[in-house]
């Protein structure tokens, strides 16, 4: 393993188990007869890759191919069934923003709550509060409960908080589809800044255009397997080929 | 034991999140209500009045050893900590499941979610306690230095609560049956604990069973030290402490053993 490797996946397999018998009436006889009570589903099949510090890596693949599972393994919320995942450094997830938002609390209260969830200290939030509010462009509503926000405003606030974390590894999942064009452009500018600062970025998107423009390297996942790993253009071409065959 | 120590260090590292989570619990609950935080006091007060009426005027339950104490005070001293216990367990039971979006997205010590709900209930309890103090003043109940025993007794209660809370939160994430089971269990447990009746009404041959129920010992001890100005039953309290420590360790161990699959099963 190279010295500057920050994410290392070694033969990672992730299986999920589903209960086959839905009701107790079906479950009990099955248990007694010694039938299988759960069916497995392999979300990731022996995947290995390494990501070095400062790399900007895109992950592409159709729905259900295992992209989100990879992100969850990196974020540390899931553990692999077999194999090993090693992550060095603070991971900041920009996945499904607003997971920690409480609808009854005001925007300002939510900034503190979400900041804490992302690992910020209160002092840090105080110092950045104005900058967060400015970025979100919703100053006049900041003391309203977020349940009154439009979905766009909600996302803006969540994104504004998330980009004010000082991450070492940034996980971006399909979130740049939110907001109007001007806000999207602003988000990309912020991500470019992160890239320049040497933050490692994992970027998941269905938009190959965005991935090619933004990432140097791309992982192509399909049917739980790593199909291709390499330069953005060649992997995206491979992805297009696969798709056109269907 | 090592994992417990590591968990404590983790929680200290994430203490600001813990603070925010407790704040979220307390602040969000009574938003958009006119009476707001007043509900925290109003709720136990109303329950208390109705129960006092039912059990002292209609059913006339004696207060025995603490004979000169009005029934409402007798009830309050035991019922308040019980409410804390029951409310802590119900909200802890739902704590992981209701934060599913966090559990599947972001890493932080999961015990914080459970601890935060329990701490939020302690805040409720402290507010409701002010009503008890007013009661004690109105009825001019003499308070001795023995009342300081309340602190270690409370500590034992919280240890016991936390152990069960950790178990319930993790188990309910895997099997939602637990929350329904808990509702049933809490009702039975309330009647099997000397709360609406004095402990010495329990027939001699069942006493040993009561000693095994830490809540019975704890509630009785509160009465002893607050109302009777007496020492608590130290042997019983020691037993309760032992049981609580064991329950806590078991709950914690179960929680940690299931923690890895939380995100898969929620």
Image (spheres, rainbow, N blue to C red):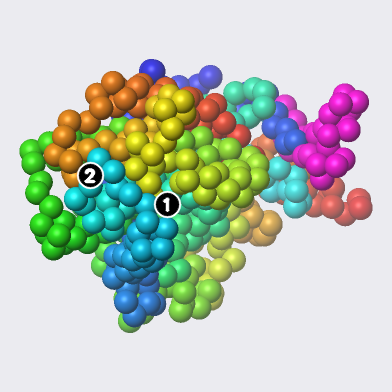
Q: Which mark is drawn over residue B66?
A: 2
Residue B134 in picture, x, y percent from top left: 16, 61
Note whether B260 is above or below A65 in the view shown. above
Q: Secondary structure at mark 1?
A: helix
For the magenta stretch, what is the residue range? Answer: A18-46
Q: Quadrant of the C terminus of chain B?
A: top right
Q: Are marks 2 and 1 on the same chain?
A: yes
Note whether A244 is above or below B154 in the view shown. below
Left or right: where A184 falls relative to A127: right
The magenta stretch spans residue B105: no
Residue at 75%, 36% in the rendered image: A17
Q: Chain of mark 1?
A: B
Residue A245 in picture, x, y percent from top left: 91, 51
Q: Secondary structure at mark 2?
A: helix
Circle 2/circle 1 CB separation < 8 Å: no
Q: Chain of mark 2?
A: B
Residue at 42%, 28% in the rendered image: B204
Note whether A240 is above or below A156 in the view shown. above
Residue at 28%, 21% in the rendered image: B235
Report which quarter residue B45 is drawn in: bottom left
Residue at 29%, 70% in the rendered image: B38
Residue A134 in picture, x, y percent from top left: 32, 71
Residue A97 in picture, x, y percent from top left: 51, 59
The magenta stretch spans residue A39: yes
Q: Is residue A90 visible?
A: no
Task: Measure how far apart labels 2 and 1 are at the Cα level.
Answer: 27 Å
Q: Which mark is drawn over residue B87?
A: 1
- In the image, A91 versus A117, the foreground residue is A117
């Amino acid at each position: 393993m190279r010295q500057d490797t920050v994410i290392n996946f070694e033969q990672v397999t992730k299986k999920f188990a589903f209960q086959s018998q839905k009701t107790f009436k079906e479950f009990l006889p099955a248990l007694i007869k010694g039938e299988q009570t759960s069916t497995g589903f392999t979300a990731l099949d022996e995947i290995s890759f390494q990501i070095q510090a400062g790399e900007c890596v895109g992950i592409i693949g159709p729905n259900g191919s295992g992209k989100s599972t990879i992100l969850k393994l990196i974020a540390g919320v899931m553990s692999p069934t077999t194999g090993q995942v090693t992550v060095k450094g603070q991971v900041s997830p920009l996945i499904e923003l607003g997971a920690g938002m409480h609808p009854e609390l005001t925007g300002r209260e939510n900034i503190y709550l979400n900041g804490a969830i992302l690992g910020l200290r209160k002092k840090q939030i105080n110092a950045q509060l104005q900058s967060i509010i400015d970025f979100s462009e919703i100053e006049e509503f900041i003391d309203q409960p977020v349940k009154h926000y439009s979905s766009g405003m909600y996302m803006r606030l969540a994104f504004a908080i998330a980009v004010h974390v000082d991450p070492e590894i940034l996980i971006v999942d399909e979130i740049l589809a939110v907001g109007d064009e001007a806000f999207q452009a602003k988000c990309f500018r912020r991500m470019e800044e992160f890239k320049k600062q040497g933050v490692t970025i994992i970027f998941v998107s269905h938009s190959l255009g965005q991935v090619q423009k933004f990432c140097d390297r791309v992982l192509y996942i399909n049917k739980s397997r790593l199909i291709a790993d390499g330069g953005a253009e060649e992997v995206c071409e491979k992805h297009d080929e696969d798709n056109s065959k269907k | 034991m090592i994992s417990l120590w590591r968990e404590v260090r983790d929680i200290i590292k994430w203490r600001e999140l813990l603070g925010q989570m407790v704040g979220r619990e307390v602040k969000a609950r009574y938003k958009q209500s006119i009476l707001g935080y007043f509900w925290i006091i109003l709720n136990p007060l109303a329950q208390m009045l109705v129960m006092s009426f039912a059990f002292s005027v209609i059913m006339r339950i004696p207060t025995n050893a603490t004979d000169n104490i009005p029934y409402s005070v007798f009830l309050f001293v035991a019922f308040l900590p019980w409410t804390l216990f029951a409310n802590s367990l119900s909200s802890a039971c739902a704590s992981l499941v209701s934060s599913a979006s966090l559990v599947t997205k972001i890493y932080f010590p999961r015990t914080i979610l459970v601890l935060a709900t329990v701490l939020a209930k302690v805040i409720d309890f402290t507010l409701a306690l002010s009503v008890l103090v007013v009661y004690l003043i109105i009825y001019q109940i003499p308070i001795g230095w023995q009342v300081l025993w309340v602190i270690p007794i409370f500590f034992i209660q919280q240890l016991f609560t936390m152990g069960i809370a950790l178990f319930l939160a993790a188990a309910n994430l895997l099997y939602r049956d637990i929350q329904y089971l808990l509702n049933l269990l809490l009702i039975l447990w309330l009647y099997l604990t000397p709360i609406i009746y004095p402990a010495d009404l329990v027939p001699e041959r069942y006493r040993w069973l009561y000693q095994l129920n830490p809540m019975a010992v704890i509630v009785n001890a509160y009465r002893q030290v607050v109302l009777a100005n007496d020492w608590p039953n130290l042997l019983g309290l020691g037993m309760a402490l032992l049981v609580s420590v064991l329950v806590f360790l078991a709950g914690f161990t179960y929680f940690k053993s299931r923690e890895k699959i939380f995100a898969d099963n929620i």
